[in-house]
Amino acid sequence: MDPVAKIFAGQATHGLASAIAEAYGAPMGRVNVLRFSDGEFLPSFEESVRGSRVFLIQSTMPSSENLFELLQMCDAAKRASARHITAVVPYFGYARQDRKDQPRVPITAKLVTNLLEAAGATRVMTMDLHSDQIQGFFEVPVDHLYSSSLFIPDIEALKLHDLTIASPDMGGSKRATAYGNKLGADVVICYKQRKKANVIDKMTVIGDVAGRNVILLDDMVDTAGTLTKAADMLMEQGAKSVRAYCTHGVLSGNAIERIEQSALQELVITDTIPQATTSEKIRVLSVANLFAAVMHKVNSNESISGHFLM
């Protein structure tokens, strides 16, 4: 007999968690958050979780309170005798710090995995990690979902002729190639040189985009500097249109203003991160049904391989 599944949400991703719970067919669990006058806070479950499989849904974008709330919820579920504790992290924050690429810096992605395991998570479910190697940082099972299962059908529905898939940097070439193979499209790579983080010095394209409808792919869009510069450059190189598909809409700083002023025809993101402001150029696809379906499979110990397109 499968353990009873209970779904709880952190405050940062409550809207998405409600949609996941509805798609799953289970009510949202009750969580109370007590806040003290100094800013300290204490989440508590308002129902028993003893012997249950607990799904704790929270994206861990800044502020760090979002991560810490998830850690506290894991610890609370562990101490309340939950049978399984699955941390559902649609957007896994701090994933960009996945290696020591200069002296005296932390590998924060590894630190976060250690914290989740120490807090009591027995399984982690996430989407489009910044690099696949982060799965190896965990000593518990990781269900790494891909937005390709949402993006590829959406791209196919556009019925674009002369389609070319583009990666905005060298690091995304594997993703672009996989999409290109699936869609039967050409692939080009944008090569960028940075002076410092979030500041691009030069950018060129490897491949021909003249007369092509181009789709840029990335795991996240933060300041949108790379994305918009790539879009403008591709249009200058003769592209007919440029769209972008990015899983996580961080959209910090002047990102939305940059997108609105760029040559991008459309930016498609998912709802792994809630959006306070948006633009007519931005379209959001929901990951709720995908996560709910995989959570069902996990709870019944069934294979989830059918949910992967990449």
Image (tube, rainbow, N blue to C red):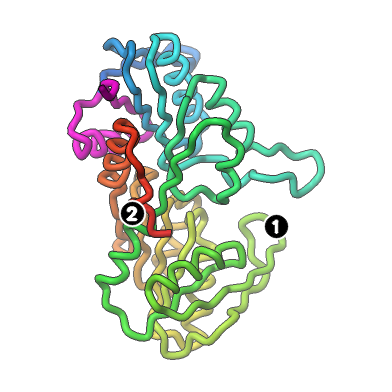
Q: CA distance from mark 2 to mark 1?
A: 27 Å
- Residue interval drawn in magenta: 1-28
Residue 57, percent across and down?
37, 32
Q: Looking at the image, which residue is at 74% across and 44% down?
A: 100
Q: Which mark is residue 196?
A: 1
- Disc 2 marks which amino acid? Thr
Tell me, yes or no, if residue 254 can be seen here.
no
| Residue 144 falls in image quadrant | top left
Report the residue marked by disc 2.
278
Tell whether 289 sits left or right of 273: left
Q: Secondary structure at mark 1?
A: strand
Q: Is residue 46 above or below residue 28?
A: above
Residue 195, percent across and down?
72, 62
Tell me, yes or no, if residue 62 can be seen here.
yes
Residue 304, percent across and down?
35, 45
Quadrant in the picture for the N terminus: top left
